[in-house]
Image (cartoon, rainbow, N blue to C red):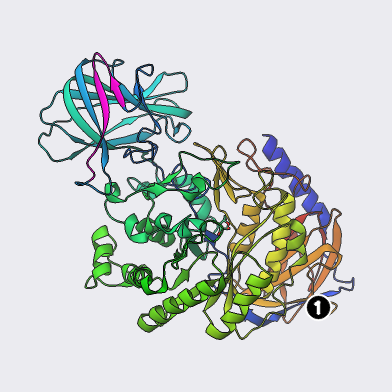
Amino acid sequence: MRFNHLIAACLISIVLSISVNAQQPCTIKINAGKSIAKIQPTMWGIFFEDINMGADGGIYAELVMNRSFEFSNPLTGWTVQPKERTSPFQKQFAEGTVRVLNRQEANKANPRFVRITADHATKGSLGLTNEGFHGMGIKKDLQYNFSLLYRQAAPGIKMYVELVDSTGKSIGNTLATPAETGTVWHKQSVNFIASATESKAKLNIWFEGSGTIDLDFISLFPADTWKTRPGGMRSDLVQLLADLKPGFIRFPGGCIVEGRDLSNRYQWKNTIGPLDQRQLIINRWNTEFAHRPAPDYFQTFGLGFYEYFQLAEDIGAEPLPILNCGMACQFNTSEMVPMEQLDPYVQDALDLVEFANGDANTKWGAVRTKLGHPASFHLKMIGVGNENWGPQYVERLKIFQQALKAKYPDIKIIASNGAEFEGERFAYLHDEFKKTKPDFVDEHYYNTPEWFLNNASRYDSYDRNGSKIFAGEYAAQSDRVVSVKNKNNLRTAISEAAFLTGLERNADLVHMASYAPLFARVDGWQWTPDLIWFDNLHSYGTPNYYVQKLFSTNRGTNVVTALSNGKPLAGQDSLYISAVTDSNTHELIVKMVNSSFQQKQICFDIEGVKKLSNSASVTVLTGQSPEEENSINSPLSVMPVTESIAVKGKKVNLTLKANSLTVVHLLLK
Ligand code: AHR
């Protein structure tokens, strides 16, 4: 109700603030008839990294934490019931035992399992409880799919599977009765409907009866995953991504590609195939920040490279995988593979292209086909390294470039320009890239809102003969980089919008851009700010999300000139403008940012067209104050509001609100 009132108030104020006047002289001229650059379909994309519990505990909908007992502490996330008994590794009870066993030689990827021995156990006397990812988000009337792997010599133990709310009350249960016997593992699946909504539910498995049974890979998924894929992704989170209509998705990182050391690097081949054979590793964000420890943060790879490609396809985004270049994170160990041992890393890149695009007659194309996707994923580009720098990076990159271009000349290569956007390291790579000319250079910018406002002209005078630019990671920091005080507020969002007008104006050079990081759990983050926040049941887009969305869903096809007194409007009087046309919809789309704390009158003349439609749509993103944010409780406080206005002639007068991004659509006749 409160929200509807707010929208109504916003609409009224927009209507009052917009007037169209055919008489008044304008200093801003937009030539809608002359394209100065094409805008790539990839222009506005997303960058997914498993940070802030973005994958496990986030978009990957698995509710059980440490389902295969492979975390460093095998019972992390689990409690043997009743709680008060003995050590977590070897629980002794009158009614039975829970032990952790390790079959290292027999199953290297997933060695641990639990052995339950029960002696006349009853519900309540012997069990295992999983706490999920800071609780489990459960929805009333939704089906939940429980499964596990088991092995037993003879039937004897039944499992009473139940979800309980935060008070311990059952909100859904079923019975699992393993029937198969022998020395091999079997899968048992059961499902049930939840009777209540709960954000902090737990899963109990009570053992009943007598005997011994081995259990592994205990899993619980909601049925309402994205595209209802079993074992899939959280649909609310994927929907937020799909709504951005992203041109590409960069994955899986970020620093997790590099790893703290090379053994902890991301290796895509370990992330495909049977889930229980995807050997998990510690997530480097587990230990990265002493001030934000995340001891229960691992990468189980339930969301692996096959799923990433599938996600890209689902949301219509070009896949952009980033691979380790033979160097671990240079902020951590800087460990490097010697040049003479780089081959397996290069081979991983070559094999990845084959995995994505090869037909069923190729080794890796056959693997993809067997996983259920005979058609190509149409991979067109690959990133070599994340934030790498120095001569060691250059010499490794060259080897990747030669090998990839020799076998796949059409695959575009994205090189890293390190972690900085200026300075000695940046300049060194910048000069090197003039010689080696990778297709794209990935630049990252984490800085103050003022930096973003002052750098809207960054690319106006960049060299046009070198590599194209991928603005791969950016986010305005309301405090400072890695400060826990950073907020996703309107001010940061508007400063990013100003910067994006500069990227758009230079779309001949800048072919891709993505905000970072993408996701954060409200109770499990390591890094802020982030584009989308969520808890176990809810999710919301930040003001920064709506800036991205306004650019990506109003991409257009061609940049046209928008000049004020003959120059791009990039900060003069706190105003920023970029304009595009869309050859499919025959529209002119003008994006305007007012970064000042006062409203501003502006006027633009539209040239190069015969006639305009007599109405325009005007969408405004602003808020009550520069500090305003969205939140779980108030997810839509800052969001775009659209109104239609009348247009006469080819001149438009607008009042731009303080701290605002305004997008105007005009039909060209
Ligand atoms: O986006 C968070 C981190 O910032 C990324 O992992 C890394 O590339 C950058 O330093």
Residue appearing at x 27%, y 66% in the figure: 374
33 relative to 588, above or below? below
Q: Is residue 662 left or right of residue 511?
A: right
Quadrant assignment, res 220: top left
In the image, 560 versus 171, the foreground residue is 171
| Predominant SS of the magenta segment | strand
* Count of number-bearing discs: 1
- Name the amino acid type tagged 1: Lys
| Residue 467 location (% of width, % of height) | 57, 80
Q: Quick one: SS at disc 1?
A: strand
Where's the N terminus, which quadrant?
A: top right
527 relative to 432, above or below? above
Q: Which residues are magenta?
A: 90-104
- Is residue 487 a member of the stretch shown in magenta? no
Q: Is residue 395 visible?
A: yes
| Residue 335 location (% of width, % of height) | 47, 61
Q: Is residue 588 visible?
A: no
